[in-house]
Image: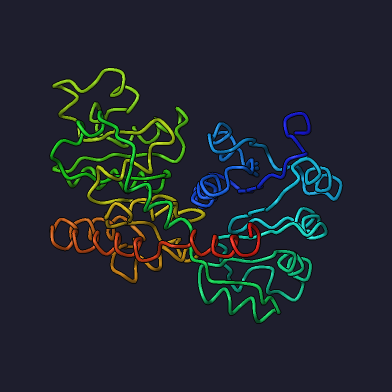
Amino acid sequence: MKQEVNSEKQHIWFHFASLGEFEQGRPVIEKVKSDYPGYPIVITFFSPSGYELRKNYTLADHVFYLPLDTKRNARQFVDIINPKLAVFTKYEYWYHFFNELNRRSVPLIVISAIFREEQIFFKWYGSLHRSMLRKASRLFVQDAASVSMLEDIGIEHATIGGDTRFDRVASNAEEPKNFQPVRKFCGAANVLVGGSTWPDDESLLAKVIEQFKEWKFIIAPHEIKPDKLKAFESLLPENGYLRYSELKENGLSEETGKLRILIIDNIGMLSSLYQYGNIAYIGGGFGVGIHNTLEAAAFGLPVIFGPNYKRFLEAKMLIAEKAAFSIKNEEELLEIMTKLQEKNFRQESGNAAKRLVLNNTGATEAIFSYLNERVFR
């Protein structure tokens, strides 16, 4: 890092756990670059899923893995990047880095944060973690409940700033990438897009594919290793599917044009694929938790996902607006798919999804109102 970074310049430092948090912070990066182009940008990641996909991100001057959170590393790292501002996202709290930034009076903000009562901050033994929250200059949280919980433990510098993901997905839906081979594959058919699916999701989707024969399906598995793809394909009708890599290389023939299932064996496409859909199924709800529902909602698609969504405020918001539906098993999935065959019901649900996204944009502006007054004045 010392060899690559000019420490005489002040940098703006963004840290993300992984790719999802990067997408959450991306609108803030873009606005920093637009409004304050004189400050070079350093991005750090905790996870390879973020680093490997965004190590060549054009708006960043440097992209690194976050060094291990030790007192010495924190001191050396902050020496090297000489930060004007540090921006952390959602769940990332690192004691020594926070302490070093605070010791040097470097502004540190946490964006799109959300808190729940079961987190360690609110336990009798969570004093160390509470001390980290006090090191931040400002906590921009997603909802009033988070502000209230923080006030109960003496944290008074939290502001409702919303979720920057709404800004990101709304922007993406306005100018999605165009995948012409996919558009041709879909033709005039109704299309279900399965995003970030896991084996539990795929076994259910195989049943939907079997029953709804007039529909086409674009499935983007969360993992695209050969064995994972083959396991999914073993659930499908023989010779009834096409991989995106084959479609891209060979185009659509008379024979492949009759196929109903397109498997995305590539990464980085999903957020734009929803433009071709009429319904979205989001994976992860039978495991650790659902993936990004807002990308699909921004395109006006009703959203279906599994039962593990309680930690995701946006999913609960979508359900409350009848824009999303949680299912526990095959029967419930087939039932909601049957309901969504009715065009008016489907459109009303999709319109509600898009309306919710548009009504919740503005988090980036709220953050910059603070930064312009307190940091860049």
Work out which quarter of the rendered image holds the N terminus and state it: top right
At which x and y percent is residue 124?
A: 75, 76
Report the side of 77 relative to 260 (left or right).
Answer: right
180 is higher (above) or lower (below) than 312: above
State the residue lying farthest toward the right.
72
Using the image as rendered, state which of residue 150 and residue 228 is in the foreground. Answer: 150
State the residue lying farthest toward the top.
250
Q: Quadrant of residue 178?
A: top left
State the residue lying farthest toward the bottom.
152
Using the image as rendered, state which of residue 236 and residue 348 is in the foreground. Answer: 348
State the residue lying farthest toward the front.
377
Report the side of 278 relative to 113 (left or right).
Answer: left
For the point 75% across and 64% down, the residue is: 135
Q: Quadrant of residue 243?
A: top left
Work out which quarter of the rendered image holds the C terminus and state it: bottom right
Using the image as rendered, state which of residue 327 and residue 179 is in the foreground. Answer: 179
At which x and y percent is residue 148?
A: 58, 80
For the point 58% across and 38% down, the residue is: 60
Report the side of 333 relative to 8 (left or right).
Answer: left
169 is higher (above) or lower (below) than 144: above
Using the image as rendered, state which of residue 73 and residue 246 is in the foreground. Answer: 73
Report the side of 309 relative to 237 (left or right).
Answer: right
At which x and y percent is residue 207?
A: 26, 46
3 is higher (above) or lower (below) than 176: above
For the point 25% across and 42% down, the residue is: 276
Tally the numbered discs: 0
At which x and y percent is residue 58?
A: 53, 34
Picture colour scheme: rainbow
